Image (cartoon, rainbow, N blue to C red):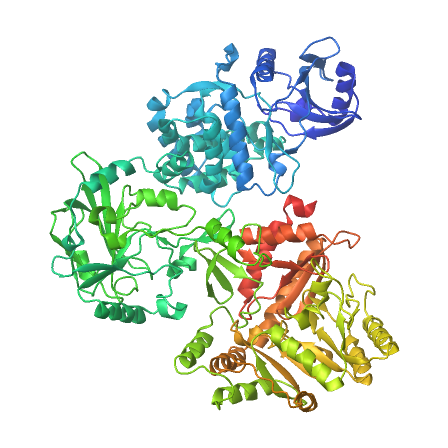
């Protein structure tokens, strides 16, 4: 019969009557969620309370049982926050109230524990999950020894009593029924040994509405676990399973999310190894109970939304949980507790240590004297450029060269190497912190000629023989099953075989040591790899039959390396022993000791970058980061054509510009062709700083004056001369203000500056004339004016209309020169024009260009008018040893050609406009984005409150959180509240979509919405 929910519901108005009548308190009433009780927060002037009103059929003895638990915690708990009970006006811990229908309700008043419900916290990061495990573990420890008769009751939410769900499978169908029956079958299998596990009274309901989290929005911690209405005497590990079941909801990787909970729980309440064998099934059974209860309650109380609140995420977790191998979960749980992940790993290592198995036994027909290890790791220079290591023929050529230089060797290696060729979509995995890659190699590769015969190194049985024919898979693959004399089972995998290997042996066939089992395949048949054998050991097949992962993510490596031990445990080849790697802490320590303290590192947790490719940087763990910061890699990190141009010229000559060479002329010609005809002379230098230093000298040589006018928060380089015109530096930390001959004008910020809105360009430019007047009043005159076309360090500030026109007119009228600093914005980046100054319909006297013209190679240039060049050529030679050297010029010319050939200026325009429009749409949903600005792929957005006050803390938080999700961003601006977007010019629409997707995630987080 359907319950009339409105007859049993207690409203906020009723709660407002109950509180003063029974407890003499009045205050603001806020309803809170609850399954059985109706809960209300009462906020008075002095304090806050939790009022709990039962349903009509509540058992007073069960309520009293809860009060006994709270009393136990009050006297036994250490470092646990638990609710305190307040007695009513008659001195009772449990009060009684008769509702309008004549039904008696049980009423309690507890202190309200301040904080936020777990369900309202975003993000629920690893540290928060860890703190949940810690609190749950402390609670399990504290409840040891507590006894009460009502703890031993029939209770449908008790995981230990989940058999009742077997009778309700008729409520489900199709995929859902399959999931329910799968986990119920597992529960039936473990039922008998499960009964012997440790038992105690446990909380039994650490769901997302019973966990209180601190109000710290950046580093939230669990403060308390509340509501003891479900406390029950059961297997103690059930409490951990319940905490996991709810905490992993809405997580991309539910197994990953469970591990910090388990780790912290174990530290407070040490689990036994045998208990961990059941945890996978127990987590699932709590969710089976939840969805079954929801299905029943949907019929009984269709108006009670609380009862249905966890149903959808519970199904999502069940689907993901079923997709995880039970063994893999078990090994992961063991690792989290500090146990050896695979329980048989030590036994296998002890057995392997006693074996005498050589690599020669695999290839008895090959005579070799030495095993030579080749480094194919992500940091390997031997691997070369991406275009090289993805070219099978070139890899085979290099291997052959290696063999030719070292007679009678077998080239091998690869165990636990992080390899670049796995960092592709095929190996991508969505973690709880964005995409990560299964890039760490779990086998050993032996680089042999195709058709090389392979023999069994051990007695065994054919577990499977199968053609894994996807591109970059194993190709034909053989898996043998082995067993030691002590009964230990393990497996060996042979990948990248020839097609005829598929007919050599059959499934379940017994093979003897030394028996021919397969041949090495060529790239047409072996999964599209250079010819080699992938050999791998496994202590478990998990749920695989024909295939098995040959790579792991760095984060999961502890587990996978335990499942897949080093094959060199058998071979004992000294050359294959793992080299010790320096961790980042060692690198940081050395930097601090021996590198200048002024050299900063990006992000709260610095990154070790080891490779670049297009719009991405790759760190040493194989994590791939979308780069929105490094505009210096103008045409993409390590662009193949640019790299080859440099390598080719470097191989034959690199010298100074005092000798004739075609490269300098050709580069100059191509560069000048992008400029107005007035700008016809070029000087090559090595950096943007050198370029601006030279431009300042030209101004002074041309005008005979020293005084320069520059813009507030401008940055032009790190030389003395550049620092003297860089307000960003001399007005910042360690600076001493503007020098005598530098005159600063206000940052022309139309959004939050001195003048705002449209038509403010001339107002800002008027300050330039004021500075000219001040200089002239001192009996001096102006040498020049330096300004970026879009002011970068000032926060991607677009210059207002007519600003440069008016400014240039004032400077030239006074006899000075106009420098356009194009170090950051030039070479097509702004999309609508090749040079930023062209956006403003002006022609400067001098243009400075920085390292983007060399794609990061130390190359820069100063382009000026003939008049300026002639004035500078006053007899004192300007010589720059490596400015304009043949290598740099070859690189620079290739960068210009790539920009043209790949239509990167057009890409900057199209992708930039798309991204800018998407950011503007985003600002409608998140008003914290006060202003979106910039041109092409030189954009920025500013974070402000409703009064346009800057929010630098939120900008810093956003940049660091985006890094966590695999996207590099940086902050800048006068108040460091602007996020800059200036990626390599190959940045695509797909990259822009990924950026927007991840920004949406962070903008919904609590700290950003505060």
Q: Is residue 19 left or right of residue 82?
A: right
Q: Nearer the viewer, residue 462 or 399?
A: 399
Q: Nearer the viewer, residue 210 or 611?
A: 611
How many circles with numbers are drawn on the protein? 0
- The answer to whether residue 466 is seen in the rendering is no
879 left or right, relative to 355:
right
Question: Horizontally, is 47 left or right of 498 in the view?
Answer: right
Give the image location of residue 407, x and y in percent.
Answer: 18, 67
Q: Residue at x 20, y 49 (%)?
A: 571
Residue 694's place in the image compared with 523, above or below, is below
Measured along the vertical axis of the image, is residue 983 above or below residue 295? below
Decide which of 486, 283 is in the foreground and name it. 486
Taking the image as drawn, is residue 958 in sight? yes
- Residue, x 19% and y 59% (percent of image)? 370
Residue 910 in percent (x, y) is at 60, 71
Q: Residue furthest front?
A: 876
Quarter of the image with the N terminus is top right
**Residue 72, above or below 442:** above
Where residue 820 sits, quadrant-wise, is bottom right
Asked if residue 214 is positioned above or below residue 785 in the image, the reply reads above
* Residue 162, percent from left and from top: 44, 25
């Amino acid at each position: 019969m359907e319950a009339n929910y409105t007859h049993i519901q207690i409203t906020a108005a009723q709660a407002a009557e109950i509180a003063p009548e029974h407890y003499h308190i009045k205050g603001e009433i806020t309803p809170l969620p609850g399954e059985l009780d109706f809960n209300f927060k009462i906020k008075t002037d002095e304090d806050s309370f939790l009022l709990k009103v039962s349903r009509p059929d509540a058992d007073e003895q069960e309520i009293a049982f809860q009060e006994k638990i709270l009393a136990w915690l009050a006297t036994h708990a250490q470092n646990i926050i638990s609710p305190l009970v307040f007695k009513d006006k008659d001195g009772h811990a449990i009060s009684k109230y008769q509702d309008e229908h004549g039904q008696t309700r049980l009423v309690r008043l507890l202190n309200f524990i301040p904080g936020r419900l777990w369900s309202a916290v975003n993000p629920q990061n690893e540290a928060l999950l860890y703190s949940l495990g810690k609190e749950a573990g402390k609670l399990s420890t504290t409840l040891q020894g507590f006894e009460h008769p009502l703890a031993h009751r029939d209770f449908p939410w008790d995981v230990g009593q989940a058999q009742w769900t077997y009778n309700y499978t008729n409520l489900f169908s199709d995929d859902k029924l399959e999931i329910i029956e799968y986990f119920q079958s597992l529960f039936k299998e473990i039922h008998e040994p499960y009964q012997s596990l440790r038992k105690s009274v446990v909380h039994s309901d650490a769901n997302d509405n019973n966990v209180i989290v601190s109000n710290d929005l950046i580093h939230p911690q669990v403060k308390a676990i509340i509501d003891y209405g479900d406390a029950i005497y059961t297997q103690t590990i059930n409490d951990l399973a319940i905490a996991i079941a709810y905490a992993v909801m809405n997580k991309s990787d539910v197994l990953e999310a469970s591990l910090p909970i388990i780790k912290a729980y174990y530290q407070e309440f040490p689990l036994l190894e045998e208990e961990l064998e059941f945890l996978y099934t127990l987590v699932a059974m709590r969710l089976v109970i939840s969805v079954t209860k929801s299905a029943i309650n949907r019929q009984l109380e269709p108006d009670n939304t609380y009862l249905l609140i966890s149903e959808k995420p519970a199904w999502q977790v069940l689907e993901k949980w079923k997709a995880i191998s039970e063994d893999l979960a078990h090994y992961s749980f063991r690792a989290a507790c500090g146990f050896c992940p695979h329980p048989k790993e030590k036994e296998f290592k002890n057995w392997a240590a006693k074996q005498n198995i050589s690599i020669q036994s695999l290839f008895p027909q090959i005579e070799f004297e030495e095993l030579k290890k080749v480094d194919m790791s992500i940091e390997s220079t031997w691997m070369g450029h991406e275009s090289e290591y993805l070219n099978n023929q070139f890899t085979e050529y290099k291997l052959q060269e290696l063999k030719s230089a070292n007679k009678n060797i077998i080239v091998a290696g690869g165990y636990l190497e992080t390899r670049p060729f796995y960092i592709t979509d095929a190996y991508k995995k969505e973690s709880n912190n964005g995409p990560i890659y299964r890039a760490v190699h779990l086998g050993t590769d032996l680089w042999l000629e195709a058709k090389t015969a392979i023999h069994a190194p051990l007695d065994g049985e054919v577990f499977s023989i199968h053609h894994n024919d996807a591109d970059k898979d194993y190709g034909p693959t053989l898996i043998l099953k082995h067993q030691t004399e002590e009964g230990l089972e393990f497996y060996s995998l042979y990948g990248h075989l020839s097609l005829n290997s598929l007919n050599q042996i059959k499934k379940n066939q017994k093979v003897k040591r030394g028996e021919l089992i397969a041949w090495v395949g060529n790239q047409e048949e072996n999964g599209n790899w250079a010819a080699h054998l992938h050999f791998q050991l496994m202590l478990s097949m998990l749920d695989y039959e024909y295939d098995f992962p040959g790579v792991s993510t760095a984060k999961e490596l502890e587990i996978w390396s335990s499942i897949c031990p080093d094959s060199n445990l058998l071979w004992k080849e000294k050359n294959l022993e793992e080299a010790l790697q320096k961790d980042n802490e060692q690198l940081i320590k050395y930097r601090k000791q021996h590198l200048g303290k002024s050299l900063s590192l990006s992000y709260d947790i610095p990154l070790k970058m080891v490779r670049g490719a297009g719009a991405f940087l790759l760190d040493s763990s194989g994590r791939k980061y979308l780069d929105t910061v490094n505009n210096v890699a103008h045409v993409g990190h390590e662009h193949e054509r640019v790299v080859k141009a440099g390598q080719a010229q470097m191989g034959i000559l690199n010298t100074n510009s005092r000798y004739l060479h075609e490269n300098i002329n050709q580069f100059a010609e191509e560069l000048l062709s992008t400029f107005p005809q007035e700008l016809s002379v070029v000087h090559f230098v090595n950096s943007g700083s050198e370029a601006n230093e030279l431009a300042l000298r030209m101004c002074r040589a041309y005008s005979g004056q020293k005084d320069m006018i520059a813009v507030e928060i401008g940055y032009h380089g790190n030389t003395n001369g550049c620092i003297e015109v860089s307000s960003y530096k001399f007005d910042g930390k360690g600076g001493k203000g503007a020098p005598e001959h530098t005159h600063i004008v206000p940052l022309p910020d139309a959004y939050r500056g001195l003048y705002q809105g449209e038509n403010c360009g001339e107002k800002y430019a008027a300050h330039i004339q004021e500075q000219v007047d001040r200089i002239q009043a001192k009996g001096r005159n102006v040498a020049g004016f330096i300004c970026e076309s879009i002011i970068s360090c000032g926060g991607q500030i677009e210059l207002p209309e007519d600003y440069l026109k008016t400014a240039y007119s004032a400077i030239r009228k006074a006899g000075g020169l106009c420098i356009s600093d194009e170090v950051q914005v030039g070479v097509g980046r702004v999309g609508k024009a090749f040079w930023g100054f062209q956006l403003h319909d002006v022609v400067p006297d001098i243009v400075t260009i920085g390292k983007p013209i060399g794609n990061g190679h130390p190359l820069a240039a100063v382009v000026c008018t003939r008049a300026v060049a002639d004035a500078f050529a006053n007899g004192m030679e300007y010589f720059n040893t490596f400015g304009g050297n043949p290598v740099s010029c070859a690189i620079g010319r290739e960068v210009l050609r790539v920009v043209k050939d790949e239509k990167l200026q057009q890409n900057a325009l199209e992708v930039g406009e798309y991204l800018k429009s998407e950011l503007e749409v985003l600002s409608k949903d998140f008003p914290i984005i006060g202003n979106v600005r910039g041109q092409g792929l030189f954009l920025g957005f500013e974070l402000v409150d409703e009064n346009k006050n800057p929010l630098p803390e939120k900008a810093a938080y956003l940049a660091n959180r985006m890094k966590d999700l695999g996207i590099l961003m940086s902050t800048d601006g006068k108040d460091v509240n602007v996020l800059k977007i200036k990626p390599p010019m190959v940045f695509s629409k797909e990259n822009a979509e990924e950026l927007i997707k991840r920004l949406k995630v962070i903008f919904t987080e609590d700290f950003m919405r505060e």
